[in-house]
Image: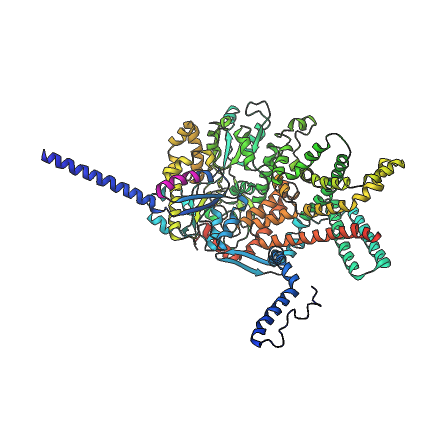
């Protein structure tokens, strides 16, 4: 009895000690960052920003660190961040922006090197992050400076119900794309009695059209793998635009407008998505968002009816020596499938978080832990299934397990189709990387965007547009120093020699 | 107190006062006198300092930026002096098509218009030299004549020759066409509301409301209203056979829609000021004219118009200065598209600023400042001062 009593007493004491210890640990954890406020700047919500606010509240409960998310228009985000950090204002601790912008910031010594933080992080599970995002998106010059919270690349979407009814197969190249667009254009695709569109591709100036043209062009330009690059010759920095491949891409992109809305030139991604989710488009180009958006309220018209596939490829690719298109064979297109070269474009690279190098050490540690928390599978695998968050998959575990997607509303077939398209793009050794060198905004957001808009508006020919883009890019390269740009471009492509 | 009569000290130490006591009094007196003399300077100093900080400094800083290449770096800026390269790029270099336009073949009509314009301007200068020559006035007119010829030449080589014009041409189109439309309608409404009609107070408020709406809101509203397929007037568009017409893909239609939105916002400004001017015309004049049997047209031309002209010129001057800076509507409605058809100079500068090309952005701003100043000063000089000289 004595023994039993003693054992019971020991057990109670041990349990009490354990509980007290856990409480103390919890209190310590909570108190750990009580005096820390992490100021984050990103684009306007709810896309991207709102989920950070919600996860921020969870993080505050766990660690005590307060998360403040400020929002500025997308077009001003880069400028605001760079100004704040370079002028020493340092009112922002974390920027969540396009990973491609990071190169210019690292070049100016503005971003914290996250390698030491990752080395101590046991929860981030780096190998689970898809290779492109782990090795290209997060890293700059061999060091991790960014933490991915959204995996971005463009895919092709098609109305599986319509195509199957018409006996058509999803497009593998641009000829097939145009044939399907022609066959479906003008038909009532959503049963509302009005004719709909064969193709929906945003083409508005100063919006996202320059991503779309690069998605069309990538398969014509790059065939030897990600390291080849679609923007420049890495050695000479000669632009890869004034050639038959890019001119063909320009013509294809413009031609898709024949089967699109009449005011497509003034439609940005938001306008196009509104048409896609209301079932008005047979084919559409978009980031990974269409899948989750079809499950959200407002996406009923296309729920489980929207198939996804890797961006159409090409059986002709650029010969860099001559600037002409040549037929694919084992030498010219080593990664081709059935004679078609695919090069899915990692447009924008995805929203990623980076930490201000000048923030104080404790804030930097707390900021890293928050970004890691957002990135960890336990959180991100749920977040990517919700369309409104704007987060798209970037972890293998998000692609291997269809259960969360079925739970979110997909049928098994639809989930497998959507995730299959993402896997096919992500695991493609010829994935085309977005531009990640200083002046990235000027190269694409200004020169490419403007000349593309002029070509689409009929002001200039495709040949003139290509020549103008080349001249504009050469000028920017000279301004930023050609040799340095070449070094950074090679690094962004993983070329170390 | 004038500086002349404050020359003598106000208080003098008494001759028999001890020197030790006299000195402080004398210092105080001198200080007081010194302050008195410079009272004017002290009074205007705060205003001058404020102007220097908030007006002159940014002007000088942006001038420095316009002749520099600026890169943001950790801990500050890296500024390299590039001379006039940023301006050369816009006027003669790779951005010429964007700022001025594309110069390909000039049509016969273009040549004829240019030659006629040159002849008219030379005749205008000649007439001035022969009648009332003053060297400063001549220089001003020379600048005006050169800019006027440059504008005509720009129109002749682009618009009249089938070439695209750049952001300068687009801005001038917004200014001249937009302001003219706004003036005519604003004046018409002001004349209407100055009549003794029922409900005129209601209409005064209604006509004034658009001025209080934010331009961003107007941009989005007009983009929606002008949507021929989804907008609230889509049924009307379909009915008139324009259901398939996409205004945003046609350069002139897009520019016109921007002018419609801009006019909707700014007509109230012209309306409200001209209404005040109309209501200030003495009733006696009008009544006397009516008794003499003058028609409404004669009353307008002989009494109303001369009375409101000074106000009308001032309101147009203010409106033109404002119109040169148009940025919100083209940014929201078309993002400068299709192509660069609706991009104003301010939007051109904004796009350069967004891509952190601060030197180009500042150079475009200075070119805009130059054009605005010359056009507005010429307008004031020719319309207002001419009239003052005549009276």
Q: Is residue B71 left or right of B318 when viewed as pictured? A: left
Magenta part, dominant SS: helix
The stretch drawn in magenta includes residue A58: yes
How many numbered discs?
0
Does any portion of residue B5 appear in the rendered image?
yes
Residue B89 at x, y = what percent?
A: 64, 55
Residue A417 in which image quadrant: top left
* Coloring basis for residues: rainbow
Does any portion of residue A243 appear in the rendered image?
no
Q: Looking at this view, is A370 or A421 the one in front?
A: A370
Depicted A464 relative to depicted B36: above or below = above
Q: Looking at this view, is B73 or B44 the one in front?
A: B44
Q: Is residue A164 left or right of B250 when viewed as pictured? A: left
Q: Which residue is drawn at 69% across and 54% down?
A: B370
Q: Is residue A189 left or right of A350 when viewed as pictured? A: right
Q: Which residue is drawn at 53% across and 53% down?
A: A237
Residue B278 in which image quadrant: top right
Give, as a single range, the part of the protein colored magenta. A52-64
Q: Report the quarter where the N terminus of chain A lies.
A: top left
Residue A287 at x, y = what percent?
A: 49, 37
Q: Residue most toward the front? A: B16
Residue A92 at x, y = what percent?
A: 46, 49
Residue B326 at x, y = what percent?
A: 65, 45
The stretch drawn in magenta includes residue B199: no
Q: Looking at this view, is A377 or B386 the one in front?
A: B386
Q: Which residue is drawn at 76% across and 57% down?
A: B140
Q: Report the quarter where the C terminus of chain A lies.
A: bottom left
Q: Looking at this view, is B355 or A143 the one in front?
A: B355
């Amino acid at each position: 009895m004595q023994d039993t009593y003693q054992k019971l007493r020991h057990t109670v004491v041990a349990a009490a000690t354990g509980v007290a210890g856990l409480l103390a640990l919890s209190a310590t954890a909570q108190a750990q960052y009580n005096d820390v406020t992490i100021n984050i700047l990103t684009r306007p919500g709810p896309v991207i920003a709102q989920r950070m606010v919600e996860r921020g509240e969870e993080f505050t409960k766990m660690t005590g660190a307060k998360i403040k998310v400020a929002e500025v228009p997308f077009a001003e985000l880069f400028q605001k961040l760079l100004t704040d950090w370079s002028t020493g204002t340092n009112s922002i601790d974390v920027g969540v922006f396009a990973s491609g912008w990071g190169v210019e910031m690292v070049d100016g010594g503005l971003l914290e090197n996250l390698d030491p933080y990752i080395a101590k992080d046991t929860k981030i599970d780096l190998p689970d992050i898809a290779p492109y995002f782990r090795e290209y998106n997060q890293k700059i010059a061999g060091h991790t400076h960014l933490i991915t919270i959204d995996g971005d690349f463009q895919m092709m979407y098609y109305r599986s119900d319509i195509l199957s009814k018409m006996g058509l197969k999803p497009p593998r190249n641009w000829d097939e794309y145009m044939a399907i667009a022609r066959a479906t254009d003008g038909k009532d695709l959503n049963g509302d009695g009005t004719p709909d569109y064969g193709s929906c591709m945003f083409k508005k100036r100063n919006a996202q059209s320059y991503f779309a043209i690069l998605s069309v062009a990538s398969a014509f330009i790059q065939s030897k793998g990600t390291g080849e690059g679609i923007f420049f010759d890495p050695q000479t920095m000669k632009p890869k635009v004034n050639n038959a491949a890019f001119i063909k891409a320009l013509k294809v992109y413009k031609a898709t407008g024949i089967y699109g809305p009449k005011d497509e030139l003034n439609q940005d991604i938001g306008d196009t998505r509104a048409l896609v989710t209301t079932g008005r488009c047979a084919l559409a180009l978009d980031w990974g968002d269409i899948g989750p958006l079809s499950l959200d309220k407002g996406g009923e018209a296309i729920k489980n009816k929207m198939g996804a596939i890797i961006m159409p490829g090409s059986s002709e690719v650029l010969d860099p020596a001559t600037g002409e298109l040549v037929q694919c064979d084992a030498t010219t297109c080593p990664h081709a499938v059935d004679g078609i070269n695919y090069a899915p474009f990692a447009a924008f690279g995805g929203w990623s978080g980076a930490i201000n190098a000048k923030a104080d050490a404790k804030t930097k540690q707390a900021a890293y832990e928050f970004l890691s928390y957002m990135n960890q599978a336990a959180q991100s695998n749920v977040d990517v299934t919700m369309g409104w968050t704007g987060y798209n998959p970037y972890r293998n575990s998000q692609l291997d397990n269809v259960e969360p997607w079925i739970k979110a509303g997909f049928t098994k077939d639809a989930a497998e189709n959507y995730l299959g398209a993402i896997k096919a793009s992500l695991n493609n050794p010829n994935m085309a990387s977005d531009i990640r060198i200083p002046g990235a905004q000027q190269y694409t957001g200004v020169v490419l965007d403007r000349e593309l808009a002029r070509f689409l508006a009929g002001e200039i020919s495709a040949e003139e547009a290509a020549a103008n883009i080349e001249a504009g890019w050469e000028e920017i390269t000279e301004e930023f120093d050609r040799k340095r740009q070449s070094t950074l471009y090679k690094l962004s492509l993983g070329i170390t020699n | 107190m004038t500086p002349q009569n404050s020359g003598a000290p106000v208080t003098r130490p008494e001759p028999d006062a001890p020197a030790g006591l006299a000195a402080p009094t004398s210092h105080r007196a001198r200080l007081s006198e010194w302050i008195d003399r410079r009272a004017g300077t002290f009074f205007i100093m705060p205003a001058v300092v404020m102007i220097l900080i908030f007006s002159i400094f940014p002007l000088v800083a942006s001038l420095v930026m316009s002749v520099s290449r600026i890169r943001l770096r950790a801990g500050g800026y890296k500024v390299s002096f590039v001379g006039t390269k940023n301006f050369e790029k816009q006027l003669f270099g790779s951005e010429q098509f964007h700022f001025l336009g594309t110069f390909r073949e000039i049509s016969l009509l273009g040549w004829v218009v240019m030659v006629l314009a040159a002849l008219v301007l030379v005749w205008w200068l000649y007439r001035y030299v022969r009648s009332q020559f003053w060297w400063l006035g001549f220089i001003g007119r020379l600048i005006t004549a050169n800019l006027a010829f440059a504008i005509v030449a720009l129109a002749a080589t682009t618009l009249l020759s089938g070439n695209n014009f750049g952001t300068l041409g687009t801005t001038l189109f917004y200014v001249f066409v937009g302001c003219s439309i706004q003036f005519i309608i604003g004046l018409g409404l002001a004349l209407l509301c100055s009549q003794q009609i029922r409900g005129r107070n209601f209409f005064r408020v209604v006509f004034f409301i658009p001025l209080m709406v934010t331009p961003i809101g107007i941009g989005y509203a007009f983009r929606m209203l002008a949507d021929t397929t989804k907008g609230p007037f889509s049924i009307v568009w379909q009915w008139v056979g324009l259901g398939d017409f996409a205004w945003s893909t046609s350069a002139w239609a897009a520019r016109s829609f921007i002018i419609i939105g801009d006019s909707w916002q700014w007509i109230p400004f012209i309306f409200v000021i001209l209404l005040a001017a109309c209501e200030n015309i003495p009733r006696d004049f009008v009544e006397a004219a009516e008794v003499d049997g003058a028609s409404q047209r004669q009353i307008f031309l002989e009494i109303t118009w001369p009375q409101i002209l000074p106000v009308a010129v001032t309101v147009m001057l203010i409106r033109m200065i404002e119109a040169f800076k148009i940025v919100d509507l083209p940014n929201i409605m078309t993002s400068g598209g299709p192509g660069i058809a609706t991009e104003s100079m301010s939007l051109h500068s904004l796009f350069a600023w967004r891509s952190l090309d601060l030197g180009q952005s500042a150079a475009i701003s200075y070119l805009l400042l130059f054009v605005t100043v010359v056009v507005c000063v010429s307008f004031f000089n020719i319309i207002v001062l001419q009239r003052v000289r005549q009276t």
